[in-house]
Image: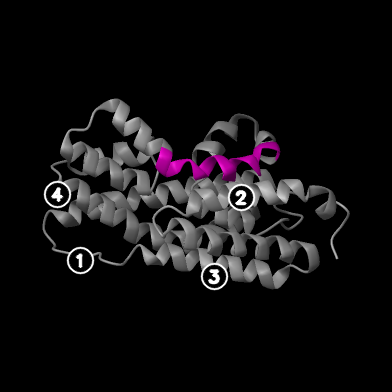
Amino acid sequence: MINKKETFRFALKKSLPVLFGYLFLGSAFGIMLYEAGYNWIWAIFISFVVYAGSGQFLLVSLLASGASFPTTAIMTLFINSRHMFYGLSYIDKFRQGGWRYPFMIFSLTDETYSVNTSFEKTPENVDEIKARYLIGLFDHIYWILGSVIGSLAGQSIPIDFTGIDFSMTALFVVIFIDLMREQKGKRRLAGIIGIFCAIVCLLIFGAENFLLPTLIITVAILSAAKPYFSKGVD
């Protein structure tokens, strides 16, 4: 039997790792935005409407340089194009959310995607679709909160956030390692293919440009090998 409290607790527990990362990264964004001449109200508005992580950091630079709207739109599309690949794997599941569907798409950031992929099933007393919706909602709230804290802190406290962005990389690595430990056979092979593609693209395209080619090549390989993977899991 579905229990609303258990659904809430499950989603909150799953989202907690993102909380700590978003408080730091969101604060870094808030400080940057304040230094560019925009107060905490703008931090709330941008984080509420844009909610694009790295895209928001880019936005600060574009605002400061007076970039045109077309330039801003194109740059944001390039930086966040990887989200299109994330969304493909959750279209069918998110559609079951009904009125929650648009927000579940909007809130599917790198971190929210990582949390969603960290579990395939939920306990019997947990509403899976509502839990995934709540995870996205909690993560969005964390980011907005971090942005406001950073903006307010930037007015009076000098803080150096150099290197803090590695906390999100560490989160991805930990989640990926846990997934690889749980999987066997063909499922683990899919992860190994992703690692191999990432290494090859890193060597070819460099650290600044390897992510999108990695996603494209990995999706292409796994799509071509779908008949093999669909035969079952070892």
Nearest to N terminus: mark 4 or mark 1: 4
Q: Secondary structure at mark 1?
A: loop
> Looking at the image, is mark 2 or mark 3 nearer the viewer?
2
Crowd class of label 4 (few under 14; some 14 to 19; many from 20; radius 10 Å): some
Magenta extent: 78-92
Amino acid at pointer 1: Asp
Q: Quarter holding the C terminus? A: bottom right
Report the disc number at residue 35: 4
Which residue position is annotated with label 2?
A: 217
Q: Secondary structure at mark 4?
A: helix
150 drawn magenta: no
Residue 127 visible in the displayed image:
no
Crowd class of label 1 (few under 14; some 14 to 19; many from 20; radius 10 Å): few
Nearest to N terminus: mark 1 or mark 3: 1
The quarter holding residue 6 reads bottom right
Point 36% across, 44% down: residue: 55
> Looking at the image, is mark 1 or mark 2 nearer the viewer?
2
How far apart are labels 3 and 4 at the CA level?
Answer: 33 Å
Crowd class of label 2 (few under 14; some 14 to 19; many from 20; radius 10 Å): some
Report the disc number at residue 160: 1
Point 31% across, 38% down: residue: 46
Which residue position is annotated with label 3?
A: 174
Closer to us: 9 or 163: 163
